[in-house]
Structures are given as C-alpha cells and as structure tokens.
Image: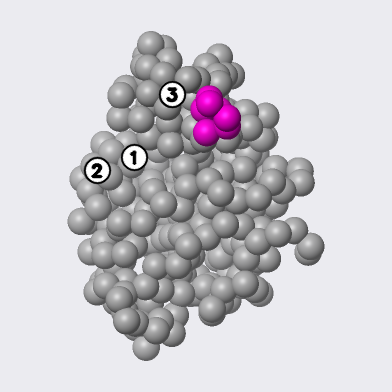
Amino acid sequence: MDSAPLHHTLARAPGAEPTRWLLVLHGIYGSGRNWNSVLRRVVERRPEWGAVLTDLRGHGDSPPLAPPHTLDACVGDLGVLSAHLPGRPTVLVGHSFGGKVALLYGDEPGHAVEQVWIIDSTPDARPPAGSAWEMLRLLRRVGGPFPTRQDGVEALEARGVARPVAQWMATNLIPEGDRYRWRLDPDQMEALLLDFFRTDAWGAVEHPHGPALHFVRARNSSVLDDEARARVRAAGTATGRATLHEVEGGHWLNADNPDAVVELLVQGLPRD
C-alpha cells in the first residue's frame, strides 16, 4: 500500500521504554486525543506497555486518504501504520466506531493480535440511526464557517445539541484565515457511517481467529442491547475467547467513568 500513515501520537510512562504496544481507535467525529488521559494512566501503571493514539481516516490530523471510505479501508490504513511504529501492536482498544474497526483488524490472522477491547460498540448490522447519524444531518445544516469556535458551539446548541457534546464537536473546527471551518467532510463521514451500519462483524466474535475479545458495555448506553449481550456471552461460552464487562456510565466512558476503563486495562492487558 502506498497511502500515507495515519496521524498518531505515542503515550508511554515517563522514562519507560515499552516492549509492547497497544493501538487505540476513537469513535466517529473523534480523534486519538479523546483517549489520551485514560491511556496515559494505563501506561504509567503498566510501563512495559506503550499506547498508539490514532486518528482514523477523515479525522483529527490524519492526511486525506483516497476512497472508498469503508471499514476495510480503515483496517488497511492500520496495517500501513503498523509498519511505522516502534513495535507491532498486539492489543487494540476501540471505542464505538473504532470498536468495530478493531474487531475486523484483530480478526485477520496476519496481524497477530492477542486482545481486542471493544468499548461500548456492537458487531451488529442495522439501519442507520442514533446520535451519530443525527449529528451528520446537523453537520450539513450547520456548515459554517464561523467567526469563532464558540459561534460553532452556539449553532449546534441552537439545534438541540447539549453543550458538552457541542463543545466536543467544536474541537473539529479549525482556523482558516479569520474564520473557523469543519475539518470533517460530511460526505466522507456519511460513507464511513453507512459502512459501519451495514457491516456485520459477528463472525469475528463467534468464529474468532485468535484474539481474546473484551466487550466493555456502558450500563447507561443502549449501544450493546440485550440480544447482543446474550450473543457475546454465548460466544464466550462456545469459544472461551469473548468476555463481557459491564461498568457504570454512558457511551462516552472515557469521560463518564475513566477509572473503570483504566482498571480493566491495567488488570487485563497481557503480562510477560
């Protein structure tokens, strides 16, 4: 592949020289920095591990990449990225959209992944719906540019977006001259979301090719519904390779309950 590597930053404990690496994948409209504080706490307690905080295609500071904008393309991007890292990642941590990408990446035997942590994400295929899909509609309506980043926040709030979510989305506004514009391309986001919704990743759960799968469900979120949770548990019984963890908090567990996520990873990451 000849595409440029994704933008990423490395997190490691002060003075540490990690011998093992984990790859962190954010949700739609996010970036690697969303998980910076959580993973820095993890590597401080497990200094043999380093974390690669990745900006997926179309997000953060990653360079423009050619279509098609699909989950398979995201998996391919990660394969390119791995060649530019200090060591091949053997654990993936993926939140929401990034959780399904992590599942698919880990399911390819050549990637030699030991564990995948799927944070409040579902392997289901389903019709497009939910807050991320609604936000796409708002991105098209609230197109900008804006005189200030705060004007972007207020434009989203005026259309019913809660202030914390509007402020988070506004981190995707970047200066251009004397204005602020969205760095997110709505057409690219739509393509990624459509492929996310139509992709059934249960094969990677029920017939895994190696990695241990850790699903982390936020109890105040509806993303992983009753049927999906039962299916994960059944897969765990059948294969011994799927575990369901349930913790308090909403979908954005990195903000709602970071302590629980840190503890799960600190205790659950492989040890030499």
Which SS does the magenta portion mostly show? Answer: strand
Q: Nearer the viewer, residue 173 or 54?
A: 173
Q: Is residue 121 left or right of residue 72?
A: left
Span colored in magenta = 175-182
Q: Is residue 1 left or right of residue 83?
A: right
**Residue 251 badge:** 1
- For the residues labelled 1 and 2, the Cα–Cα distance comes to 8 Å
Tag 1–tag 2 contact (CB < 8 Å):
yes
Give x and y (percent) for residue 86: 54, 78
Task: Kindly state the secondary structure of the residue where label 3 is placed.
Answer: loop
Give the residue number, with chain letter if any, for mark 2: 256
Residue lying at 52% horizontally and 73% vertically, measured from the top left: 89
Which residue extends farthest top? 158
Give x and y (percent) for residue 100: 53, 50
Quarter the N terminus occupies:
bottom right
Q: Earlier in the sequence, mark 1 or mark 2?
A: 1
Tag 3–tag 2 contact (CB < 8 Å):
no
Residue lying at 47% horizontally and 20% vertically, measured from the top left: 147
Q: Nearer the viewer, residue 2 or 189?
A: 2
